[in-house]
Image (spheres, rainbow, N blue to C red):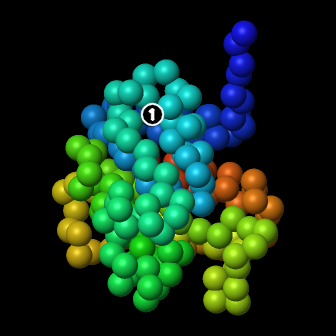
């Protein structure tokens, strides 16, 4: 029996553009995901030919996995929290170090319905973009507040944003 996993058409179309553009650019990509739980990686690998550009996807939902798989420092996590520019940047850098990819995008955030605070509300997602030839001391990261769109809505918007960042001409 064949079972289909259906991703939203908007997500698949964005992933198709990412795969095609990165094939043309000759770039390999890696993704380090937290709040999206593999949604970005799943959308990319939905596209035939994605193996030409997709190096790896790390789903580091817990802080322990951010530490052990991506080498994020405990000091960063304790000082800034997992939903921070510092941690997103460390995730992206760690993903590059663990692979042969040319570009990495990291995503960490609060999808809800719980976990938010006045300082870090539900719907806040932090993104980082790192390139192999970039200066690791020049942080390229930003946060977005999508609002409380529901868990699925926040994850979808975060995944779409991450896919846009994987386009060769992207910048935060």
**How many marks can you see?**
1
Position of residue 73 in the picture relative to residue 152 (left or right): left
Indicate whether 95 appears above or below 87. above
Position of residue 167 in the picture relative to residue 95 (left or right): right
Q: Residue 73, located in which quarter of the rendered image?
A: bottom left
Q: Position of residue 104 (x, y in %)?
A: 36, 53
Indicate whether 71 appears above or below 12. below
Name the residue: 42% across, 73% down. 87
Q: Nearer the viewer, residue 150 or 141?
A: 150
Q: Position of residue 74 (x, y in %)?
A: 37, 79
Dot 1, crowdedness within 10 Å: few (<14), some or many (≥20)?
many
Q: Secondary structure at mark 1?
A: helix
Is residue 79 in view? yes
Indicate whether 1 appears above or below 113. above
Name the residue: 44% across, 55% down. 32
Q: Position of residue 121 (x, y in %)?
A: 70, 80
Instruction: Identify the residue position indicated by label 1 in the image.
Output: 19
The quadrant of the picture occupied by the N terminus is top right
Q: Position of residue 81 (x, y in %)?
A: 50, 81
């Amino acid at each position: 029996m064949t079972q289909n996993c259906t991703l939203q058409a908007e997500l698949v179309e964005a992933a198709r553009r990412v795969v095609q553009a990165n094939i043309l650019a000759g770039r390999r990509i890696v993704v380090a995901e937290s709040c999206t739980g593999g949604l970005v990686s799943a959308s990319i690998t939905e596209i035939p030919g994605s193996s030409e550009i997709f190096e790896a996807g790390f789903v580091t939902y817990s802080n322990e996995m951010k530490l052990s798989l991506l080498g994020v420092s405990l000091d960063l996590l304790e000082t800034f929290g997992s939903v921070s520019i510092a941690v997103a940047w460390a995730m992206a850098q760690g993903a590059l170090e663990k692979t042969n990819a040319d570009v990495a995008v990291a995503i960490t955030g609060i999808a809800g319905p719980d976990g938010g605070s006045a300082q870090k509300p539900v719907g806040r997602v932090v993104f980082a973009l790192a390139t192999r030839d970039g200066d690791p001391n020049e942080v390229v990261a930003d946060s977005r507040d999508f609002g409380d769109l529901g868990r699925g809505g926040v994850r979808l918007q975060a995944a779409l944003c991450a896919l846009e960042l994987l386009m060769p001409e992207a910048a935060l």
